[in-house]
Amino acid sequence: MKQSIEVITPLMAAQMLSANPINRKKRQGWINDLSDLILRGEWKCTHQGIAISKSGYLLDGQHRLEAIVKSGASVPMSVSRELDDDSFSVIDRGITRTMADCTRIPKMTVEVINFLHYMSCGRASKPTAQQVFEIYKKVGAVADELHLYAPTRTKTFASVGVRSAIVILTIAGQTKCFEYYRKLTLSEFDELPQIINVFVKKAVSGTITSDKSNGGVAQVEIFCKALFAFSHLNANKTKFPHLDADFIKAKREFVSSFLLRIDL
């Protein structure tokens, strides 16, 4: 095996991809993320790169190469050549590092960061480590403190949508949110404002979201309702606003602008 660092141009990437008969199915979302990373200047050359067999087949690196083609930019990359043709079966068999592993930021805080990034960019795009660090500078201290103050994990009540709403509202100056969140996770409902108890009833009855999967769509709805419920402006209200597409779009834009204007 021969290994070198080479500057891979879009043309070279396209040529390498033409000899790619055995790789796994492409993940377009990951290609888009890598392309955006390159265009933001966040690309780092590491030992991981491209692997080409003795027969000239591409064994590893198809998503990186696709991202180079999509971005139209050239980047330095490690290139390993003359690997045995059967080595494909043992490539990428290690345990994938989580973002918490990569950044050493607490897992629950990374969950909040990932969700706020998802809300602000409007698509299911995983943030890079650099983006995680940038958002952490803005919300990390509050998120870390929240998870220490109220570590109890309960379904829906301690979901990432609720925690993200608490972090945003607390940074905005609403000082009661931590207390209310802790009481919520400890099921101390009697001392909570009326609208938060409405939130509780909807969660218990299973009507807090229109999406029963508890996936991304459900968490967006939970976030929007928690943002409304935990605001002191709505303490005595008994109904939530209708969550149509325009309402959710407005909340996405709110999160995006909020993250931009937080002072570091």
Image (tube, rainbow, N blue to C red):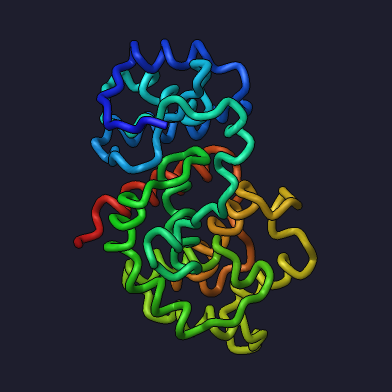
Where is residue 104 drawn, in percent x and y?
39, 67
Compared with 109, 50 (above or below) is above
Q: Nearer the viewer, residue 62 or 205?
A: 62
Which residue is pictured at 57% across the width and 54% down the height? 95
Q: Nearer the viewer, residue 23 or 219?
A: 23
Count of picture labels: 0
Compared with 56, 130 (above or below) is below
Compared with 232, 11 (above or below) is above
Which residue is pictured at 50% across the width and 68% down the height? 108
Q: Nearer the viewer, residue 187 or 234?
A: 187
Compared with 89, 150 (above or below) is below
Which residue is pictured at 63% across the width and 62% down the height? 239
Where is residue 177 drawn, in percent x and y?
45, 77
Please indicate whether residue 38 sits to the left or right of residue 56 in the image: left
Residue lying farthest to the left in this orientation: 264
Please indicate whether residue 236 sits to the left or right of residue 143 in the image: right
Indicate the quadrant containing the C terminus: top left, top right, bottom left or bottom right. Answer: bottom left
Where is residue 252 drawn, in percent x and y?
44, 45
Report which quarter residue 79 is drawn in: top left
Please indicate whether residue 140 sits to the left or right of residue 126 in the image: left
Please indicate whether residue 60 sits to the left or right of residue 211 in the image: left
Indicate the quadrant containing the N terminus: top left, top right, bottom left or bottom right. Answer: top left
Q: Is residue 209 visible?
A: yes
Which residue is pictured at 30% across the width and 50% down the height? 130
Where is residue 23 drawn, in percent x and y?
59, 25
Residue lying farthest to the right in this orientation: 205
Report which quarter residue 133 is drawn in: bottom left
Q: Is residue 234 visible?
A: no
